[in-house]
Image: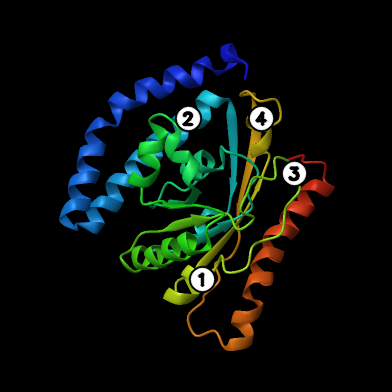
Amino acid sequence: MNVMRSLPFFFWGVGSMVRLRKLKRLIDSARADGRHGEEQECIRLAQNYWGAGALGALGGTLVTEHLERIPEGPVLFVSNHQGNVDIVVFMAAVTMKQHGFVAKQELLGIPYFGKWIPRIRSLMIERDDPRSTLRAFQEGEEWLRQGFSLVIFPEGTRSKSDEMGEFKKGSLRMATQTGLPIVPVSLSGSWRLFEEKGYPQPCTVRFYVHEPIATAGLDRNELAGLHARVEGIIRNKVDEWNAQGGKL
């Protein structure tokens, strides 16, 4: 990692700890008392501050399309996964509602961030432990029923490129079990922000929201084809961008 190029992000992160201290107390208090609506709003405010600030400190420029398609109420966002900053990109783009993440357990070891990622109602999973993943998804179903939204990256790992890997089966379970909408999202350019060179560099990240997909009332055949349907929607947009050479 190029330390000098990472300093702006480091100093911004240190300063954000002070700014978010009050929201931390409010989130923890609301969660302890079961005040879900208040907790969601405080998480949303924290994410709005952290997402925009962190993306700017990293040098990213965000271009969003069709945010108006995101419905009210809890949803399961489903997206391709290019880089570690995809979480920051989501927080910068989706400002109208709280959204936790299905994230790997190792993120808990990152100073400061590791304490905040579960605080925003993220599910921490051990990728090599199917039972742990199943338990996490069951907890996620309960959170969705309580009004919290979640983001899942079904590839299971970063592509670190403009290409897309295959989606893992079972990744849409939380939506189909609760009957809540799936919101497909296509991302492009986020891997260049950090993974391409191993340190932050200015780049443009594209965030495209597709039409939401209702899961309530789907028959057996529709449920069986849902995985391929969602992956195809996201992949088609990524392929379209790649065919254009990544140009806006």
Classify mark 4: residues with Cα within 10 Å, few (<14), some (14-19) or many (20+): some
Residue 31 in sight from this viewpoint: yes
Residue labelled with disc 3: 162
- Quadrant in the rendering for residue 162: top right
Q: Gap between marks 4 and 3, in whole Å?
A: 13 Å
Task: For marks 3 and 1, give the CA distance.
Answer: 26 Å
Q: How is the image coloured?
A: rainbow
Q: Is residue 94 left or right of residue 36?
A: right
Indicate which disc, 3 or 1, sits on the residue closer to the N terminus. Answer: 3
Q: In the rendered view of the protein, which quadrant contains the N terminus?
A: top right
In-image side of 17 versus 9 (left or right): left
Q: Secondary structure at mark 4?
A: strand
First-in-chain label (2 vs 1): 2
Q: Amino acid at mark 1?
A: Arg
- Front residue of this view, candidates 197 and 209: 197
Mark 4 residue type: Cys
Q: Position of residue 109 (x, y in %)?
A: 44, 35
CA separation, marks 2 and 3?
A: 22 Å
Dot 2 lies on which element? helix
Which residue in the protein does label 2 denote? 54
Residue position marked by numbered label 4 in the rendering? 203
Q: Quadrant of residue 75?
A: bottom left
User: Between disc 2 and disc 3, whose residue precedes?
Assistant: 2
Q: Marks 1 and 4, how far apart in space?
A: 34 Å
State which tag comes first along the sequence, 2 or 4.
Answer: 2
